[in-house]
Amino acid sequence: MSDDWNDYADGWDGNSDVRHYATRAFAALDALAGITGGGWQDKRVLDFGCGTGLLSGKLAPHVQEVVATDTSERMIAVLEEKALPNVRALHTDILDGSAAADGVTGFDLICASSVCSFLPDYAGAVAALAGLLNRGGMFVQWDWLAPEAGSSGLTVQQVREALRDAGLGAIRVEQAFEMESGGQAMPVLMGSGVRQNG
Ligand SMILES: C[S@@+](CC[C@H](N)C(=O)[O-])C[C@H]1O[C@@H](n2cnc3c(N)ncnc32)[C@H](O)[C@@H]1O
């Protein structure tokens, strides 16, 4: 298995598991935040680690703008080819400290779907992303639910601590859905928190 996300970009949308994951994540987000209810039309969303934009495409019709960022040039190229209305695709590393200076800030919602467990400094990333939220803005992540630290994915405790240490409130961490892999059920957690201060 390659550790270069560029190698997966061309076949990403052809993988039914990947599409199913995005569908289930969006459904869980909608149940949490009421995205499809009409109240998000003036809201700005960041899809962090957007890949080919499977989640961005579901969010875009319901919000003002989706800024979709990824460090994989090829993932972003596939997303750009889709020319999705309302979606601004950026090949950039917004964790390098340049996000606010580049205007990549002021979000009402930040989503990270199947990204956080791959980051070398997960807790640091959540803290940086929380700083890009408007007051009252929400951070939401989905990752494989690990039974214990050191297993692949993230534990409920790891997520709860990272969200708390990032200064987020109204924290919720729970199993959102399951995926099937080789006859085995793989639980996916959803963690969310809200920026309390200005
Ligand atoms: C499992 S894929 C998920 C893609 C997409 N969110 C989805 O659900 O289809 C992980 C993505 O995270 C991206 N990624 C990894 N590290 C990143 C970072 N530091 N900043 C932004 N994106 C990152 C990868 O390039 C890859 O596209």
Image (cartoon, helix red, strand yellow):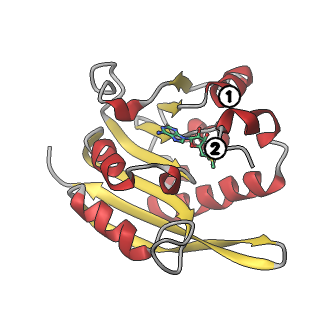
Decide: is 99 above or below 116: above
Under circle 1, the secondary element is helix
Query: Which quadrant of the structure image shows residue 60?
Result: top right
Q: Does label 1 point to a residue whose CB lies under 8 Å from ligand 1?
A: no
Q: Nearer the viewer, mark 2 or mark 1?
A: 1
Under circle 2, the secondary element is helix
Q: Earlier in the sequence, mark 2 or mark 1?
A: 2
Decide: is 89 above or below 152: above
Decide: is 90 above or below 3: above
Cα separation between marks 2 and 1: 13 Å
Residue at the image position 49 percent from the left and 71 percent from the top: 150
Residue 155: % across, % down? 45, 73
Residue at the image position 64 percent from the left and 37 percent from the top: 53
| Residue 130 in sight here | yes
Question: How many numbered circles are shown?
Answer: 2
189 or 67, nearer to the observer: 189
- Picture quarter with the C terminus: top left
Tell which quarter ligand 1 is in: top right
User: Which residue is disc 1 drawn over?
Assistant: 79
User: Which residue is disc 2 drawn over?
Assistant: 58
